[in-house]
Image: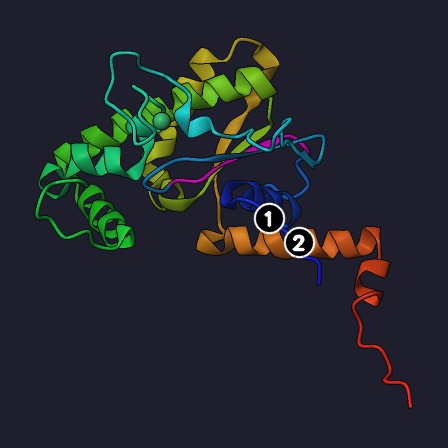
């Protein structure tokens, strides 16, 4: 069988385009919300790959030249502001990633702790999530100014905490987008969960097969000659 490899953000963007919350929207951006942040960009119904396949490294856009050092070695990347590590560091500093001697629990547990704290009105968490939401909107506005998407779908932890993040993010996006029609762009939380990338991979195989059914016929077992 032919084997293809792609990254999680590109595949999740395809899944959103084919069967997710923004299905059929030909101009969309998908953002993974993990400890780091990646992007998948669909323009005119096609995945944008760039000359070498490295488009979508949006987590490493520099948004704060005086900011913290990123895992990539640069300073002030977007993911140092909006990645889960940034939110945990501000909202629950005693549990921050990278503390010496601290166990590294499942990120899902920390997101659940955050959701519980936010629901009960924890002030420090509320302030931290508002700050992250603003940075999310600032980065989103760069993408909106560049690509003019109709929708920015947020996945991973962004989706889990969407009700607290999105009002701040949307507000900031609207303020910073230049062209008035582009300001219609809205953030929407993914509903595909952590299965988004694998669903996108499956949709890629299905569309390849529709484009060229012979790829499957060529791999069917041959009759054994007598
Ligand atoms: Zn970086």
Residue at mark 2: C-beta within 8 A of ligand 1:
no
The residue under the point 40% across, 35% down is 37
Above or below, 171 relative to 187: above
Instruction: Indicate whether residue 160 is drawn in magenta.
Output: no
What is the CA distance from the residue labelled 2 to the residue labelled 1?
Answer: 7 Å
Front one among 104 and 2: 2
Front one among 196 and 222: 222
Residue 134 is labelled as: none
**Label 2 vs 1, first from the N-terminus:** 1
Q: Position of residue 118 (x, y in %)?
A: 21, 42
Give the residue at the far right of this rendering: 226
Image quadrant of residue 180?
Answer: top right
Ligand 1, seen in the image, is in the quarter at top left
Residue labelled with disc 2 = 203
Above or below, 4 relative to 62: below
Residue 15 is labelled as: 1
Decide: marks 2, 1 in contact (CB < 8 A)?
yes
């Amino acid at each position: 069988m032919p084997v293809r490899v792609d990254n999680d953000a590109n595949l999740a963007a395809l899944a959103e385009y084919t069967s997710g919350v923004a299905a059929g929207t030909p101009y969309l951006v998908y953002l993974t919300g993990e400890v780091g942040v990646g992007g998948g960009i669909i323009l005119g119904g096609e995945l944008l790959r760039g000359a070498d396949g490295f488009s979508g490294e949006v987590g490493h856009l520099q948004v704060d030249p005086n900011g913290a050092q990123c895992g990539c070695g640069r300073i002030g990347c977007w993911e140092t502001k909006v990645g889960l590590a940034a939110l945990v560091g501000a909202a629950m500093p005693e549990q921050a990633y990278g503390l010496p001697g601290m166990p590294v629990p499942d990120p899902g547990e920390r997101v659940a702790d955050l959701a519980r704290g936010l629901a009960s009105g924890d002030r420090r968490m509320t302030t931290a999530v508002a700050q992250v939401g603003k940075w999310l909107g600032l980065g989103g506005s760069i993408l909106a100014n560049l690509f003019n998407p109709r929708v920015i779908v947020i996945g991973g932890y962004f989706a889990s905490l969407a009700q607290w993040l999105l009002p701040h993010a949307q507000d900031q996006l609207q303020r910073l987008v230049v062209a008035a029609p582009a300001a219609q762009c809205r953030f929407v939380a993914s509903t595909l969960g952590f299965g988004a990338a694998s669903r996108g991979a499956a949709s890629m195989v299905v569309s390849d097969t529709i484009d060229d059914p012979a790829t499957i016929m060529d791999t069917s077992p041959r009759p054994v000659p007598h």
